[in-house]
Amino acid sequence: MTDATALPGWTLLYSGKVRDLYTSPEHDGQVLMVASDRVSAFDHVLEPGIPGKGELLTTLSGWWFDRLEVANHLAPTPVIGLAGIPAEVAARSMLVTTLEMYPVECVVRGYLSGSGWLEYQQTQSVCGIPLPAGLSDGDRLPEPIYTPAWKAPMGEHDENITFERTVQLVGAEVATSLRDLSLEIFTRASDIAEKRGVILADTKFEFGADPVTGELTLGDEVLTSDSSRYWDADLYATGNRTASFDKQIVRNWLTAHWDQTGTPPELPQEIVEQTAARYRELIERLTGE
């Protein structure tokens, strides 16, 4: 069960851990993507949510879409209200064009962290890409690497895969385009973030084909706190590689207070507030607002 909002004139198409998708006969070929305040970790939706999170993620996605200079799924925004975006969810919604999505999460890593660090310790590689010996958790990589994942059906876990496996899934031409465009966007975004004292350690993109033109198009959210790992550059320079602008605070608390069996415990209010503050701080640092 989720807290998906009932919207007059719109039909709930799908409700995920964080986002709800709606369709309307007034908007053929388009979907209303509504970001909730729900927060998930370790494949569980947690209680309570993070106040304002949906609006913050939507704001950040919109800010990045405006700067990436790449085809994206944003549709011309209709008037808020009747037959447009309902006013009660306008601040956390994006009206988007329906794409033929590829079953690949396009992950780019500029630093060794998370699941990449775990894999490196065992194989000295990530997704089949050999890396230099002697790296530590949080080290900057010689150059960004593309480490795709297979988007598993609902209820199953996504799986890290090699580039060769993406060729099998979508064909050589599309696989190459996904890789090259992902690396290009990551490099551009990293430069923008760096100028604002923020490190973009890694992120994931999702792409689809425009159903009319076939053009490779950036979809879903982009470069948000939920899809990316951001660090404070000044703190990183002092050796602190844990001060991320995301829900790591939530993951850390759960790891210390839950063995990942049964229902996860309710988040304390101070953890909720600290997480919300990190989301807000990232937007302030990046946008200056």
Image (tube, helix red, strand yellow):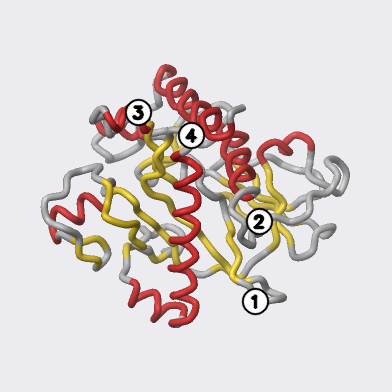
Q: CA distance from mark 2 to mark 4?
A: 38 Å
Identify the element where label 3 is drawn. helix
Residues at discs 2 and 4 in contact (Cβ within 8 Å) = no
Q: Residues within 10 Å of mark 2 (few under 14, many from 20)?
A: few
Q: Residues within 10 Å of mark 1 (few under 14, many from 20)?
A: few
Tell me which amino acid carries mark 4: Arg
Quadrant in which residue 208 is drawn: bottom right
Q: CA distance from mark 4 to mark 3?
A: 11 Å
Q: Is residue 34 left or right of 130 when viewed as pictured?
A: right
Q: Position of residue 173 (x, y in %)?
A: 48, 81
Tell me which amino acid carries mark 1: Gly
**Residue 234: mark in rendering:** 3
Tell me which amino acid carries mark 3: Asp
- Which residue is farthest top? 270
Q: Residues within 10 Å of mark 3 (few under 14, many from 20)?
A: few
Quadrant in which residue 272 is drawn: top left
Q: Residues within 10 Å of mark 4 (few under 14, many from 20)?
A: some
Q: Position of residue 176 (x, y in %)?
A: 44, 75
Q: Residue at x 43, y 36 (%)?
A: 198
Q: Earlier in the sequence, mark 2 or mark 4?
A: 2
Q: Earlier in the sequence, mark 2 or mark 3?
A: 2
Q: Earlier in the sequence, mark 2 or mark 1?
A: 2
Q: Residue at x 31, y 70 (%)?
A: 162
**Residue 214: mark in rendering:** 1
Front tag of 2 and 3: 3
Quadrant in which the C terminus appears: top right
Camera-side residue of 149 and 42: 149
**Residue 13: mark in rendering:** 2
**Residue 196: mark in rendering:** 4
